[in-house]
Image (cartoon, grey):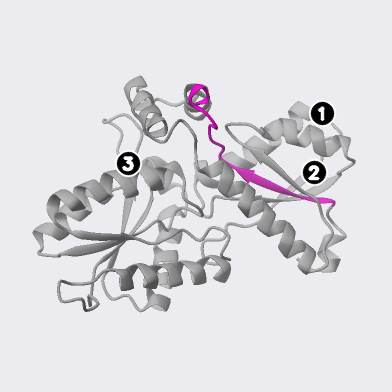
C-alpha cells in the first residue's frame, strides 16, 4: 500500500477464523463454526478433544496477535499511519463488535486482510458474507470494507514457505548422518467438500502455490494432499488424506517424508493436531522419519 492508497482508507481490518482461549470456550466456539452445517455431533466432540488435548486453548489467537503486531510495525516502517483492528468469524473479538468499535472511532472505510489465502466458499466468500452481516448488524453508518485479494501466489507467502521447506528437508538425515536426497514432500491443506471445490479455484490455487514453493525450494518429489475433513462420511471431500498418503509412501519403500502445511498461514489447531500429533504418531509407528515445515507466520 502506498500513500495514495492510504488516503482511501482510515484503518486496516485483520479478519481471522477465531479460536477458544480456555476449555469452557471450546464447545460454544465449535457450535459457532458448525452452525447450519450437516456435521455429526460425534465429529464435533472429536474435534473438541483435539482442543482439550492442548488445554482448550487454540494457538491461533497468540499467532494472530503476533501477525497484527508485525503488520503495525510494517505500516509504521513504511510511514503509513493506519490503526489495525481485529475481528473474527467464530469467536471473540467478533466482527460485529469490532465494526462497532471502528464506527465509534470514526472509521469510514477500511481495508480487510483475511488470514485464509485461498479461494473457496469457506475460505473467501463466507468471510465477505460475514463482513456484510456484521456491517448490517452495526447499522447504516458501519464502515465500508474492501477485502484484499487472496495471497496464495504472493512472494511474501511463497518465499518464506520455500525457505521453511528447505530447512525441513535439511533436517532429515539418514543413518550415516548424511542429508537425504529426494525425500518426498507432501503439501497439505484443509479438505473441503467436492461440491465446494468444484465451484471455486481452491484446488487450482493450492496446486499453483505448491508448484511455486517446490520450484523455488528445488523439490523433485511432491504431492498435494488434504487433512482435517469434518463432514458426514457419505459426503465426498477432497482426497487423499495426509495419513493415507503417508501409508502409500511407506508401501513404496520411502523411509522419510516432509509435511508442508501450505494451506495455513500459521500453526492452527489443525496443524498441531493433524500433523504434529496424528501424522507424527503414524510415521513413528511405520518407522518413517518425518519433518514438518514451519508455516509462514510473521516471516513475510
**Is the C-beta separation of discs 2 and 3 under 8 Å?**
no
**Looking at the picture, how far across and down is residue 46, in whole percent?**
33, 28
Q: Is residue 227 visible to the viewer in this orientation of the structure?
A: no
Q: Secondary structure at mark 3?
A: loop
195 or 95, which is in the foreground? 95
Q: Which residue in the structure is indicated by mark 2? A: 144
Left or right of residue 161: residue 104:
right
Q: Secondary structure at mark 1?
A: loop
Which is more N-terminal, label 3 or label 1?
1
**Is the C-beta separation of discs 1 and 3 under 8 Å?**
no
**Looking at the picture, how far across and down is residue 89, in whole percent?**
60, 35
The residue range painted magenta reads: 10-25
Which is more N-terminal, label 1 or label 2?
1
The Cα–Cα distance between marks 2 and 1, rounded to whole angstroms, is: 11 Å
**Looking at the picture, how far across and down is residue 90, in whole percent?**
57, 32
Q: Which residue in the structure is indicated by mark 1? A: 139
Which is more N-terminal, label 3 or label 2?
2
**Looking at the picture, how far across and down is residue 118, in whole percent?**
51, 54
Q: Quadrant of the C terminus?
A: bottom right
Residue at position x 57%, y 60% in the image: 151
Amino acid at each position: 500500500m502506498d500513500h495514495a492508497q492510504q488516503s482511501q482508507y482510515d484503518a486496516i481490518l485483520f479478519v481471522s477464523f477465531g479460536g477458544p482461549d480456555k476449555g469452557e470456550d471450546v464447545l460454544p466456539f465449535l457450535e459457532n463454526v458448525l452452525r447450519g452445517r450437516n456435521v455429526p455431533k460425534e465429529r464435533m466432540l472429536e474435534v473438541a478433544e483435539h482442543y482439550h488435548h492442548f488445554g482448550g486453548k487454540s494457538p491461533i489467537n497468540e499467532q494472530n496477535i503476533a501477525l497484527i503486531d508485525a503488520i503495525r510495525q510494517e505500516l509504521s516502517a513504511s510511514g503509513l499511519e493506519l490503526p489495525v483492528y481485529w475481528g473474527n468469524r467464530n469467536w471473540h473479538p467478533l466482527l460485529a463488535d469490532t465494526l462497532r468499535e471502528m464506527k465509534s472511532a470514526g472509521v469510514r472505510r477500511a481495508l480487510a486482510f483475511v488470514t485464509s489465502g485461498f479461494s473457496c466458499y469457506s475460505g473467501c466468500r463466507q468471510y465477505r458474507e460475514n463482513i456484510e452481516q456484521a456491517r448490517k448488524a452495526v447499522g447504516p453508518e458501519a464502515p465500508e470494507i474492501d477485502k484484499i485479494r487472496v495471497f496464495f501466489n504472493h512472494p511474501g507467502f511463497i518465499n518464506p514457505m520455500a525457505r521453511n521447506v528447505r530447512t525441513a528437508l535439511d533436517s532429515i538425515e539418514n543413518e550415516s548422518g548424511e542429508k537425504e536426497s529426494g525425500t518426498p514432500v507432501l503439501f497439505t491443506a484443509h479438505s473441503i467438500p467436492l461440491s465446494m471445490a468444484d465451484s471455486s479455484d481452491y484446488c487450482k490455487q493450492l496446486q499453483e502455490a505448491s508448484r511455486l514453493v517446490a520450484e523455488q525450494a528445488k523439490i523433485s518429489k511432491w504431492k498435494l494432499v488434504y487433512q482435517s475433513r469434518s463432514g458426514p462420511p457419505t459426503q465426498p471431500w477432497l482426497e487423499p488424506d495426509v495419513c493415507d498418503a503417508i501409508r502409500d509412501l511407506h508401501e513404496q519403500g520411502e523411509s522419510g517424508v516432509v509435511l508442508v502445511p501450505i494451506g495455513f498461514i500459521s500453526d492452527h489447531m489443525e496443524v498441531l493436531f493433524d500433523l504434529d500429533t496424528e501424522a507424527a504418531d503414524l510415521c513413528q509407528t511405520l518407522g518413517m522419519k518425518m519433518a514438518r515445515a514451519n508455516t509462514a507466520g510473521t516471516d513475510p
